[in-house]
């Protein structure tokens, strides 16, 4: 039985690698992407980790013992380069190593960094670029093609919110380039991962089935998430009861031009906005419970308070439910 679990996991990892163009993929049970990066064990004591991760600041501050963690904002070439200038990094296996961490879409404001420029700048700084691709998903962005050596994605949405535990896919870039050239950054990251000798995840047949079915239906479902997010963003942008609607597909978003060149099939499933003279908790009290309790990545639109229920910021992840019904329900709650 144990052997069959490993075969199932290997097949799933190979399927994910084929989809992302990765050299190899490892599946992990981890509560979120920073925890998965820590579990990989490739960020070591003596390394420096420069991260844009304001919504996971505590996870970075406490999850990488012995590592010099520097949080930056915004996720720009200038900010990450400035935080790296006094560190003597190397692509040699012995290190020390310099890591840059950003989201393809993420952080407060749903920022979209210029991944191509970051990939080039990272190699100039001898840094290893890691991208959290959870929000955009492999359907909406391929960080490995844009310069990342490692792409990490929590699979809630891939599993349609039906997985019994949190899973993360870690995809490693290929180091062999065209015309027999070698990507030293990707080769370094691969050597570090290979040295870990990671064991295969034990994945029961039922859990493997959820992931396999999710992969088979991913494109259709993710397009539905993306399309509904756009419709809800446009509704919110025209709603006088909210302000500061943040969605990469709106021309008002600071990274709209970047997102147009980085993201695929739309602009992701997430929208952020601020309430006017009321707290997130007050809005939640006026909404049906499923808007808060539905599983992450599932069919029902889900709302959260990324800055806490006492603050006014709302983050919405569009489900595959009818956006007209969602908008009407939101409108009713916003006007109470």
Image (cartoon, rainbow, N blue to C red):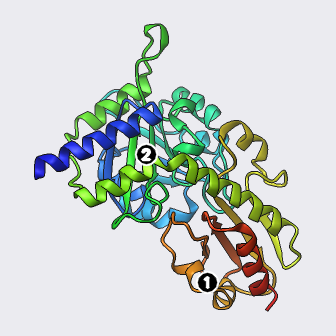
Q: How far across and how far down the image is residue 202, in percent?
A: 20, 54
Q: Which residue is mark 2?
A: 48
Q: How far across and how far down the image is residue 223, in percent?
A: 62, 50
* Circle 2 crowding by C-alpha within 10 Å: few under 14, some 14–19, many from 20: many
Query: In the depicted view, which residue is nearer to us: 106 or 229?
Result: 229
Residue 91 visible in the displayed image: no
Q: Which residue is mark 1?
A: 309
In this rendering, the label closer to the viewer, 1 or 2: 1
> In terms of secondary structure, where does tag 1 sit?
loop
Circles 1, 2 touching at the beta carbon (< 8 Å): no
Query: In the depicted view, which residue is nearer to us: 31 or 118?
Result: 31
Q: Which of pointers 1 and 2 lies earlier in the amino acid sequence? A: 2
Q: Is residue 58 left or right of residue 112?
A: left
**Quarter of image, res 31:** bottom left
Query: In the depicted view, which residue is nearer to us: 52 or 125?
Result: 52
Image point (54%, 30%), residue name: 145
Q: Is residue 213 left or right of residue 202?
A: right
**Quarter of image, res 155:** bottom left
Q: How far across and how far down the image is residue 209, in percent?
A: 32, 55
Q: How far across and how far down the image is residue 15, in percent?
A: 37, 38
Image point (46%, 16%), residue name: 177
3D distance between C-alphas at marks 1 and 2: 33 Å
Looking at this view, name the residue that lies furthest to the top: 179
Figure label count: 2
Q: Is residue 98 above or below residue 160?
A: above
Residue 157 visible in the displayed image: yes
> In terms of secondary structure, where does tag 2 sit?
strand
Image point (61%, 83%), residue name: 309
**Quarter of image, res 95:** top left
Q: Which mark is residue 93?
A: none
* Circle 1 crowding by C-alpha within 10 Å: few under 14, some 14–19, many from 20: some
């Amino acid at each position: 039985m144990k052997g069959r679990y490993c075969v199932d996991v290997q097949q799933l990892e190979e399927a994910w690698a084929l989809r992302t163009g990765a050299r190899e993929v490892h599946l992990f049970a981890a509560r979120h992407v920073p925890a998965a990066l820590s579990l990989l064990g490739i960020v070591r004591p003596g390394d420096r980790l420069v991260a844009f991760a304001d919504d996971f600041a505590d996870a970075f501050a406490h999850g990488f013992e012995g590592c010099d963690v520097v949080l930056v904002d915004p996720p720009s070439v200038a900010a990450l380069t400035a935080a790296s200038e006094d560190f003597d990094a190397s692509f040699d296996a012995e290190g020390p190593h310099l890591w840059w961490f950003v989201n393809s879409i993420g952080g407060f404001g749903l920022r979209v960094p210029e991944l191509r420029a970051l990939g080039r700048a990272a190699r100039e700084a001898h840094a290893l670029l890691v991208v959290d691709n959870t929000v955009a998903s492999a359907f909406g962005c391929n960080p490995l093609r844009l310069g990342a050596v490692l792409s990490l994605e929590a699979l809630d949405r891939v599993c349609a919110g039906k997985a019994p535990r949190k899973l993360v896919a870690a995809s490693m870039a290929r180091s062999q380039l065209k015309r027999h050239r070698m990507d030293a950054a990707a080769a370094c990251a691969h050597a570090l991962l290979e040295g870990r000798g990671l064991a295969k995840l034990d994945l029961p047949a039922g859990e493997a089935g959820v992931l396999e079915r999710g992969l088979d239906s991913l494109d259709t479902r993710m397009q539905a998430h993306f399309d509904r997010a756009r419709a809800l963003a446009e509704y919110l942008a025209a709603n006088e009861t909210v302000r500061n609607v943040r969605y990469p597909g709106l021309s008002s978003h600071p990274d709209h031009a970047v997102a147009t060149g980085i993201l695929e099939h739309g602009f992701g499933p997430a929208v952020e906005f601020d309430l006017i003279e009321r707290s997130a908790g007050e809005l939640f009290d006026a909404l049906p419970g499923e808007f808060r309790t539905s599983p992450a990545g599932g069919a029902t639109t889900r709302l959260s308070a990324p800055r806490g229920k006492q603050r006014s910021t709302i983050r919405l992840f569009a489900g595959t439910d009818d956006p007209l019904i969602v908008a009407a329900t939101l409108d009713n709650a916003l006007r109470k």
